[in-house]
Image (cartoon, rainbow, N blue to C red):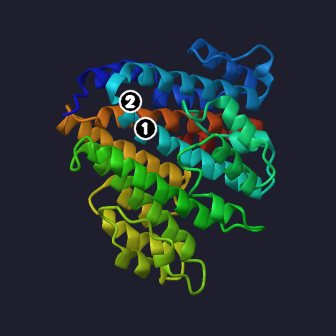
Amino acid sequence: MTSWDDLNARARGLATHLLGRAALESLAQAEDLPTLAAELARRGYPIEEGAQQRGTGIELAARREGARRLATLRRWAGRREPSLAIVFEDEERRSISSLIRGAAQHAPPEARLSGLLPTPALPERALEELSRQPAPGAVASLLSAWRHPLANALLPEAARPEPDLLRLDVSLNRAFAERAFKSARQRGARGMLARHVQRLLDIENSFTTLVLSEEKDSRMAEYWVPGGRDLTEALAERAVASGSPLAAGRIVAAAFAGTPLASAFAEPGSHPEGIEGAVLGGVIAELRTAARTDPLSPAFLLGYTLRLRAELLDIRRAVWGISLGAPAAIRMGGLVTAS
């Protein structure tokens, strides 16, 4: 049986360096980007000289600091490093999805990188190279050339002249699920790692229902990712047939009754941080509870990595809120970090 005591202890030490809600609210109220950059530098973020005036430079510093902390966890993991592959590949599938969508939309490279967290397999330089690719197929081909474990799942659809972005997401999620469950089974099929993967798949299937609910004659079976625990395919089909994301969200919320995720899906358009931010906050809250009730599990470690993602997203929100002149109240209201 895998022991997590020391790695959880390390994660607790790293968690003391997270900014926390109060600090992030203060940052969100900064009057300009140089002030924000100075405050982040004072808190240990590696702001390069000349980057204080640029939102992209501040975001780069946040990505690099996040990558440094993940690399620290990896060094401490030792023989448990294969278990951390679940954490890293969860970030990578999110990054790959964002980069593919950015390529399809011909977004500027810096916009495609916004909010991404580098990992050992996809470090900052790799993400930058992927962000410069002209089309989804080029992103998938480059990942394949690098032998990334999720790449092959993308190639058939990505090679099409106009690939279906939702199908690409589903292919990515199915490949992630297969690899994640294989790793989790090796460390206890009924353990926290397996339950965490199930929760991630429930969430991805729920997001799919919201998208498909706006389309005519959509069949959930074509986009279903098996392996979740609480959301059944039958309930998802009913949500898709409801005809709108609002109705679909309320149906999906029943699968998460009694959890923080229920409210996130019940009113999908009502969250200042967006539904993805609300869902991320809900998963963090669930893992915080799990860490208290089962302190020997990797719940704290998993929660820490998601809190790190939330901090990166909150810094991004502060950067672009300041850049666009959004009122401080709106910048603060959209923060994901709860405490």
The mark tally for this picture is 2
**In this picture, is 313 found above or below 105?**
above
Local crowd size for mark 2, using a 10 Å CA cut-off: few (<14), some (14–19), many (≥20): few
SS for dot 2: helix
Residue 28 location in percent, x, y?
61, 32
Q: Quadrant of the N terminus?
A: top left
Taking 46 as reference, is 335 left or right?
Answer: left
Q: Amino acid at mark 2?
A: Glu
User: What is the quadrant of residue 127 in the picture?
Assistant: top right
Taking 162 as reference, is 315 left or right?
Answer: left
**In this picture, is 1 found above or below 177?**
above
Q: Amino acid at mark 1?
A: Ala
Residue 65 location in percent, x, y?
57, 23
Q: Which residue is mark 2?
A: 81
Q: Name the residue located 36 percent from the left edge and 61 percent from the top edge.
A: 262
Numbered label attached to residue 85: 1
